[in-house]
Image (cartoon, helix red, strand yellow):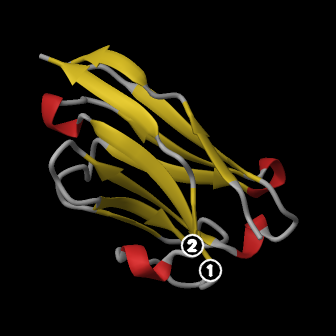
């Protein structure tokens, strides 16, 4: 069982930066693949970024590539999402998720077994 708690969301002006954190409980965090997803009002949940268990492979949705960076610190049981050059269209609730398939990244919500509650990111124009 893995419990995930996100933090770091808030209100930022367009062009600004935020760093989201996702703290995980459990001794097996280092074996899990991790992902970030977001959901804007009235829209479906969207994949943002993923990272495999050792951080060796990352993957991003095209709309954030070059602006967002996913990373992890297995010693701290934490995964991060550094967001830069934020745009109003990045406004959403951001959630982290964990999958036992740690060696592969996935963009599909159904591949992730554990989810956090989410943190709100609002980008003003």
State the CA–CA distance, disc 2 to disc 1: 5 Å
Circle on res. 52: 2
- Tag 2's secondary structure? loop
What x and y, as percent, mark residue 68? 35, 44
Q: Secondary structure at mark 1?
A: loop
Q: Position of residue 81 (x, y in %)?
A: 48, 44
Asked whether disc 2 touches disc 1, contact meaning CB atoms under 8 Å apart, the reply is: yes
Query: The N terminus is located in which quarter?
Result: bottom right
At label 2, counting other C-alpha atoms closer than 10 Å, the crowd grade (few under 14, some 14-19, many 20 or more) is many
Residue at the far front in the pictured view: 42
What's the mark number on residue 7?
none
- Figure check: 17 above or below 93: above
Residue 102 disc label: 1
Which residue shows up at 29% across the image and 25% down it?
122
Residue 12 is situated, as x and y percent measured from the top left of the image, at 31, 16
Q: Quadrant of the C terminus?
A: top left
Residue occupying the point 46% across, 50% down: 95
Residue 33, position in %: x, y? 59, 72
């Amino acid at each position: 069982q893995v419990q995930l708690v996100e933090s770091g969301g808030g209100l930022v002006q367009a062009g600004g930066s935020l760093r989201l954190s996702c703290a995980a409980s459990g001794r097996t965090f280092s074996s899990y693949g991790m992902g970030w997803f977001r959901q804007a009002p009235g829209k479906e949940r969207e994949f943002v970024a993923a990272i495999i268990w050792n951080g060796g492979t990352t993957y991003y949705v095209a709309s954030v590539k070059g602006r967002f960076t996913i990373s992890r610190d297995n010693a701290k049981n934490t995964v991060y999402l550094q967001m830069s050059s934020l745009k109003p269209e990045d406004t959403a609730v951001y959630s982290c998720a964990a999958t036992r398939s740690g060696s592969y990244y996935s963009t599909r919500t159904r591949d992730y077994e554990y989810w956090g509650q989410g943190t709100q990111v609002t980008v003003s124009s």
